[in-house]
Image (tube, rainbow, N blue to C red):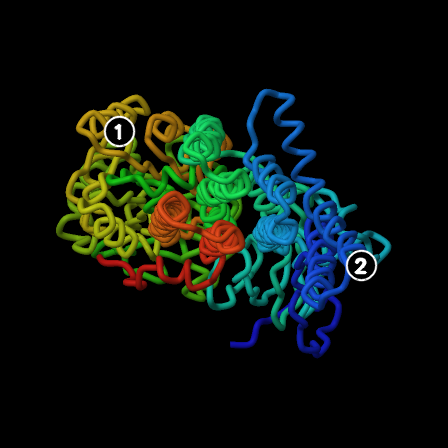
């Protein structure tokens, strides 16, 4: 279908193929750690070649010294600073071991330790930078310039200078410069970078658009609704940067143990050195064994085991529209074994839609004619139900007649003169079987709907349409279920072993209808905010770790009380967004089980890394104590395990790590 665009817009030009946004990647040599490691490595390799070539010491000795200095000065300085703060740093222990090797004539082995240690540090720095790149690269998706529409025409402006209320002209093939709402035009937007949606999304007046998403073949006028610094992309970057500064419980535990471990390792090293001397061992052999022990027993790989997997998972989730606020939050998401959902705005979209149009017998109206009359009367209204009626008429392509003498009475509905008749549209504030505004005649009509409106379900809201005071028919409106709600609840049931619980302040009939459509059994309705908190605490008192998913101000207490909380971001209240551990940016419900699976994958990688690190340390230490472990082999084993656990954690940056957590789309039921 070809979109029709207002003639007031700039004529459509044939778009050139859109170039992908540049990918921001930190260059290896842009990192000082990498530059110093390169200098150290080159100096060592040249010195090694001269050494093995039989040249005199003065030819290669200064190069070994350069390798020591270039690769060791920074960790030595950091270690001394830590020592001044009465903290024993494992980096300092590595430098001491290298200098100790040189002191007993093993200059080449000590230099090798420095080179591998410096290279390991450079790889760690690169891994951290690339993790940040994967999220900060989103900023490159937002264009640097935008076309602003003013009273005097169009003007190009930097996107950083845009303000809320500005109107932008988005031409075909351009990237949208700011978060906003479509005022005029029709097109499609590729939002995969923000929401993870695989297909372009149709955009019409009233629809929300995001900075950095790619416009299709139509022309749009967009009103800026967020400051550029507060756009979805900017918030992703901010939250991930904040998350990178937090430490998960596992990391905090490891760092507490690290200090005691390092002190114990120093004592053990002195014992490995001193005990053999007491029994007559050679000084050089005892010192070499002690230095090797210090190297292989250092917990570098253990320290690096935790944060790379968690930060990689945070970055990957952020790319797919789930903002996890900290490493602590990411780790806790993987621990949940029970889920509780809010209903309105979470499992449902929180906006009504017309589900049935039923003219009453004798009215002489078709369903379309009844809907058109109601839409004409509701057209000037700003009430959500009125907008839903008008939207339904437009979706059916009905002509909406002009109305005059519009009157809206809060709590009772609207009236307007349409085609010479006074059309009234009054909402029944409660479900089908309740009275409409206390009017006895209207009550009788609604009570008769079971026969006259067989398609109406419990939990629907009924709107009574009258003409000159005579009932003409009814409209049934319902809160639409989110498309991925059944698949999401099924996926979470499979993950936790129990079906999620539905906690809602809505009435029992409406809650039951949503529960039936999503396969939920445990339904608790008519809850005040404290009732939701009590339900969450009841589950947790039974030993469950609860994930609560909600969106409203009334959900904030439950989000805070739960083991972990996820808020729906698009329509979520500020309080809910602040309270939650994670935010689903655009209400893609299917991302909830995906991020839980991603968290569990991160936790598994942490365990894997700890096993890898522990295995290497144990094996190398036993080899050194019970046999003869060559220093170069000990260095290679220790630093190799450190690099291995770092790279293992970065596996979660891959797209396949997110896709493996997605549940198949199952649509809606009922």
The spot of residue 131 in percent (x, y) is 57, 52
Label 2, secondary structure: give it: helix
User: Horizontal placement of 12 versus 259: left or right?
Assistant: right
- Which element carries disc 1, helix, strand or loop? helix
Q: Which mark is residue 646?
A: none
Please name the residue shown 46% across and 61% down the image: 394
In the depicted structure, whether residue 82 falls above or below residue 118: above
168 to 526, vertically: above or below: below
Q: Position of residue 650 (x, y in %)?
A: 49, 55
Q: Mark 1 sits on what residue?
A: 536
Please name the residue that numbered disc 2 is placed on: 59
The residue at the far left in this view is 451
Q: Is residue 183 visible?
A: no
Whole-percent x and y of residue 398? 44, 64
Label 2 neighbour load within 10 Å: few <14, some 14-19, many 20+? few
Residue 7 located left or right of residue 494: right
Residue 122 seen: yes
Q: Residues within 10 Å of mark 1 (few under 14, many from 20)?
A: many
């Amino acid at each position: 279908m070809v979109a029709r665009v207002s003639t007031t817009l700039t004529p459509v030009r044939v778009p050139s193929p859109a170039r992908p946004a540049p990918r921001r990647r930190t260059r290896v040599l842009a990192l000082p750690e990498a530059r110093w490691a390169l200098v150290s490595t080159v100096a060592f390799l040249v010195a090694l070649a001269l050494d093995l070539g039989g040249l005199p010491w003065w030819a290669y000795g200064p190069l070994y010294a350069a390798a020591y200095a270039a690769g060791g000065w920074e960790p030595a300085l950091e270690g001394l600073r830590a020592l001044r703060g009465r903290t024993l740093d494992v980096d300092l222990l590595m430098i001491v071991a290298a200098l100790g090797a040189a002191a007993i004539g093993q200059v080449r082995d000590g230099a090798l330790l420095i080179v591998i240690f410096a290279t390991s540090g450079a790889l760690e720095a690169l891994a951290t930078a690339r993790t940040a790149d994967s999220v900060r690269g989103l900023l490159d998706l937002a264009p640097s310039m935008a076309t602003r529409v003013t009273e005097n025409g169009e003007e190009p402006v930097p996107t950083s200078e845009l303000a809320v209320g500005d109107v932008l002209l988005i031409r075909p093939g351009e990237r949208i410069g700011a978060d906003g709402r479509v005022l005029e035009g029709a097109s499609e937007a590729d939002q995969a970078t923000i929401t993870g949606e695989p297909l372009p999304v149709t955009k019409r007046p009233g629809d929300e658009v995001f900075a950095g998403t790619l416009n299709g073949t139509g022309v749009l006028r967009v009103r800026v609704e967020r400051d550029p610094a507060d756009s979805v992309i900017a918030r992703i970057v901010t939250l991930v940067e904040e998350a990178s500064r937090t430490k998960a419980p596992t990391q905090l535990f490891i760092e507490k143990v690290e200090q005691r471990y390092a002190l114990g390792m120093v004592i053990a090293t002195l014992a490995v050195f001193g005990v053999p001397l007491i029994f007559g061992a050679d000084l050089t052999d005892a010192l070499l064994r002690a230095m090797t022990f210090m190297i292989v027993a250092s917990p570098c790989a253990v320290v690096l085991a935790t944060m790379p997997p968690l930060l990689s998972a945070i970055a990957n989730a952020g790319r797919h529209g789930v903002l996890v606020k900290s490493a602590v939050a990411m780790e806790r998401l993987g621990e949940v074994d029970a889920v509780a959902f809010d209903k309105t705005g979470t499992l449902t979209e929180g906006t009504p839609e017309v589900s049935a149009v039923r003219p009453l017998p004798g009215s002489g109206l078709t369903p379309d004619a009844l809907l058109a009359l109601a839409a004409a009367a509701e057209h000037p209204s700003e009430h959500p139900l009125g907008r839903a009626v008008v939207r339904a008429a437009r979706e059916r392509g009905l002509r909406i007649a002009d109305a005059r003498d519009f009157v809206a009475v809060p709590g009772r509905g609207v009236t307007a003169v349409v085609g010479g008749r006074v059309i009234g549209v009054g909402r029944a504030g409660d479900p089908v079987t309740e009275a409409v505004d206390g009017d006895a005649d209207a009550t009788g009509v609604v009570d008769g709907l079971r026969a006259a409106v067989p398609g109406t379900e419990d939990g629907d809201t009924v709107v009574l349409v009258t003409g000159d005071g005579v009932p003409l028919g009814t409209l049934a409106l319902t809160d639409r279920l989110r498309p991925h709600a059944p698949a999401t609840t099924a996926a979470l049931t499979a993950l936790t072993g129990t079906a999620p619980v539905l906690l809602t302040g809505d009435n029992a009939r409406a809650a039951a209808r949503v529960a039936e459509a999503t396969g939920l059994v445990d339904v608790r309705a008519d809850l005040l905010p404290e009732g939701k908190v009590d339900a969450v605490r009841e589950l947790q008192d039974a030993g469950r770790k609860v994930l609560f998913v909600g969106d409203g101000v009334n959900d904030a207490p439950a989000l805070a009380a739960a083991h972990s909380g996820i808020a729906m971001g698009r329509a979520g209240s500020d309080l809910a967004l602040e309270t939650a551990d994670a935010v689903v940016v655009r209400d893609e419900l299917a991302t909830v089980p995906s991020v839980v699976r991603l968290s569990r994958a991160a936790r598994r990688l942490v365990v894997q890394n700890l096993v890898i690190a522990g295995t290497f340390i144990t094996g190398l230490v036993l080899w050194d104590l019970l046999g003869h472990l060559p220093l170069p082999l000990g260095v290679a084993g220790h630093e190799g395990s450190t690099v291995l656990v770092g790279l293992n954690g970065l596996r979660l940056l891959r797209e396949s790590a997110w896709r493996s957590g997605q549940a198949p789309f199952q649509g809606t039921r009922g």
